Amino acid sequence: MTALHEVVPASEGIDHQPYTYVRKELVEPDWRRFPGWSHVTEAQWRDAQWQRVNCVKNAKQLRKVTGDLLSEHFYDELAADQAALATMSMLLPPQMLNTMAPTAAPEDFTEAFFADPVRRYMMPVRSDRDAHWPSHPHSERDSLHEAEMWVVEGLTHRYPTKVLAELVSTCPQYCGHCTRMDLVGNSTPLIQKHKLELKPVDRQDLMIDYLKRTPGVRDVVVSGGDVANVPWPQLESFLMRVLDIDTVRDVRLATKALAGLPQHWLQPRVVEGLERVARTASRRGVNLAIHTHVNHAQSVTPLVAEAARTALEVGVRDVRNQGVLMKGVNATPNDLLDLCFALQGEANILPYYFYMCDMIPNAEHWRVAVWEAQALQHAIMGYLPGYATPRIVCDVPYVGKRWVHQLAEYDRELGVSYWTKNYRTGIELADPEALDRRYPYYDPISTLGETGQAWWSAKA
């Protein structure tokens, strides 16, 4: 018998841990492997305007980039999805496309591209979707009811001390699982998008006026869309006006572009402007952070790390990641830990949240059940520093973010969990039952047993 204090040498060649950390150097995949970019220089690649001009928006442009690397079968699958299932139009900066199938040999490229985790959520195809339950019966376009909680156009007051300011309804890139698919991006054959009606300057004036009149709000998330699509002078002006409100103590800039188009955040005029905003925030004692959205370690490249470090160097307090948990992308312990170590250890981006994918139409193939999310939270504990261990959360409609272990009741057979809350949303201030009600959330039906699936089939 071995005493606890005795050191037991590790056996060579035996992996004693469920996950083994190995430091991996970040690599920018060689974009010249794509026939359409074979002559693109490094200076062009680092140029934000070149990246925007050369975004891939349709199959024709994808063919121009990839040449003969992709089979006709892939294009058939892509066309079928775009025609009938896609809730987001296609928009991929070269930076993002370049992280897909980064090491595949030409003869294996189609197969690798189909299997690629970044491709799976940025460029979904018909065969990705759940054939039997593409949408949950309770899925909704605005699954979190954000627009229902607008106090002025684009300003969601959902939590007691926090607001979400949607300055723009576009992004430099469109994610297939976008929770704001009812508003963000171009319309698709399936989804006619809503539109922001006010002029940006008028919308921003109303937002500032509301913040001045509502001193209980101390935290402003500035988002969209993506703040990278707000012209910098306009964004800087809005941020300075927010920072001029004494009761605001936290400002967060939401931008997937830090990972999808890091070139934007490396432009001298943006860096200089961000430094002005950061210095003003510091002088006024306000915490300024950037929140980005990275879902797989492949997306963490040297350019992404450079953009994050640059933001920190000019005075942004934190750069944090809010990923989305998705099957086929990152819903395994190894994938999550690989991503978190790449973010935290190599790019100075703090792993913060992993949201369960929201209940929007045609998202069932991405979503995980609550019990699966709980198992993943358990599996990643103990490997990362405590402050860099992300919380896996369920964004429950009419409730908000809840750690996946916070449910009040769980019917595993039917896949229905029930949640409570300790505050009223902006539309429930006069609701006496809001704090006692149990709010339902639904697991993907494909994760249920035969009895549960039969129950939902009969209900449909």
Image (spheres, rainbow, N blue to C red):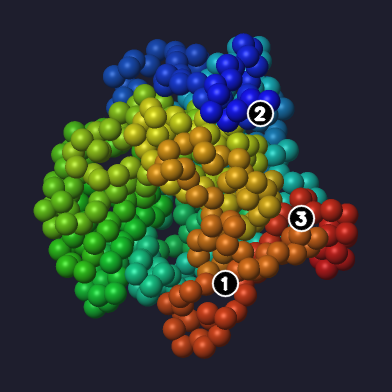
Q: Residues within 10 Å of mark 3 (few under 14, many from 20)?
A: many
Q: Is residue 46 left or right of residue 414?
A: left
Quarter holding the C terminus is bottom right
Q: Residue at x 20, y 57 (%)?
A: 286
Please state which amino acid type lies under the numbered disc 1: Thr
Q: Secondary structure at mark 3?
A: helix
Q: Is residue 281 left or right of residue 74?
A: left
The span from disc 3 to disc 2 (Cα, nearest Å) is 24 Å
Asked whether the viewer can see residue 181, the reply is no
Q: Residue at x 18, y 47 (%)?
A: 278
The one nearer the camera, 403 or 100, is 403
Q: Name the residue tied to disc 2.
A: 114
Q: Residue at x 31, y 63 (%)?
A: 219
Decide: marks 3, 2 in contact (CB < 8 A)? no
Q: In this rendering, is residue 126 above or below 235?
A: above
Asked whether the viewer can see residue 359, the reply is yes
The span from disc 1 to disc 3 (Cα, nearest Å) is 23 Å
Q: In the image, which disc is placed on residue 325? A: none
Q: Residues within 10 Å of mark 1 (few under 14, many from 20)?
A: many
Please state which amino acid type lies under the numbered disc 2: Phe
Please state which amino acid type lies under the numbered disc 3: Ile
Q: Earlier in the sequence, mark 1 or mark 3?
A: 1
Q: Name the residue tied to disc 3.
A: 445
The span from disc 1 to disc 2 (Cα, nearest Å) is 40 Å
Q: In the image, which disc is placed on residue 420? A: 1
Q: In this rendering, is residue 88 above or below 92?
A: below
Quarter holding the N terminus is top right
Q: Residues within 10 Å of mark 2 (few under 14, many from 20)?
A: many
Q: Earlier in the sequence, mark 3 or mark 2?
A: 2
From the top left corner, tell me how far across and down residue 239 is, in percent: 22, 56
Q: Secondary structure at mark 2?
A: helix
Q: Residue at x 40, y 44 (%)?
A: 387
